[in-house]
Amino acid sequence: MNLVDIQKLFAYTEWANHLTLDAVEKLTVEQQRQNFNISHGSIFGTLVHTAAAEWIWLERWQGVSPTALWRVEEYDDLAHLRARWQQIEANRQTYLASLTDADLERLLEFRLLSGQADALPLGAQMQHVVNHSTLHRGQVVGMIRQLGIVPPATDYLFYLRAIR
């Protein structure tokens, strides 16, 4: 894995996140907040969790280990969450631009939410973030489908086709 690959994976993640947010914007607040009894309960809850996880990892890469995830109650609506997520994306792009291939191999220490110390190579942490976001986007897509609505196609293949 090299920096170009990591940057491409994050470009995909942002593209797929945007498609998902665009689809969720078309739902009613009731649909966004309906409890599906999976993942983080609702579409909105799962999106808050996903954005919070992307934020936590970015903070860890910069030497800060947050001790708590965001709570759904902290966000008035999807527009508020989207604005915060866009800040994370911009900050992550700036951070990625500062890296080299060698940085991806560097063992980077962090603390889990429990406070337990851990360490993984930076590149592996980044791959985890992309994978984690993909997992939860898939859950959101499934919840949208359960509402009887055709969800966006967010697979990596669709991203590759969209950018050619």
Image: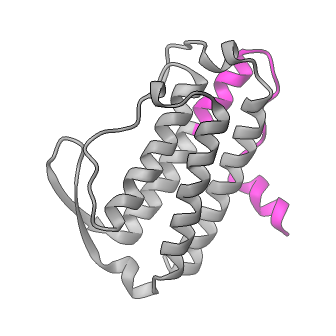
Q: Position of residue 142 (x, y in %)?
A: 65, 26
| Residue 84 located left or right of residue 20 | left
Q: Nearer the viewer, residue 89 or 4?
A: 89
In terms of image quadrants, where is residue 23?
top right
Residue 131 sits above or below residue 144 on the image:
below
* Residue at image coords 78%, 38%: 152
| Residue 141 located left or right of residue 75 | right
Q: Position of residue 67 (x, y in %)?
A: 25, 44
Q: Quadrant of the C terminus?
A: bottom right
In terms of image quadrants, where is residue 87?
bottom right
Q: How is the image coloured?
A: one colour
Kindly report the secondary structure that dominates the magenta region of the rendered protein: helix
Residue 138 sits above or below residue 33 on the image:
below
* Residue at image coords 66%, 47%: 17
Q: Position of residue 90 (x, y in %)?
A: 59, 64
Residue 60 sits above or below residue 106 on the image:
above
Identify the magenta region: 137-164
| Residue 162 located left or right of residue 20 | right
* Residue at image coords 46%, 54%: 129
Residue 56 painted magenta = no
Q: Position of residue 42 (x, y in %)?
A: 56, 20
| Residue 157 located left or right of residue 88 | right
Instruction: Give the number of callouts.
Output: 0
Residue 91 sits above or below residue 69 on the image:
below
Q: Which residue in the rendered view is the most extreme toward the left? A: 116
* Residue at image coords 34%, 68%: 62
Q: Nearer the viewer, residue 38 or 86?
A: 86
Residue 162 painted magenta = yes
In terms of image quadrants, where is residue 65?
bottom left
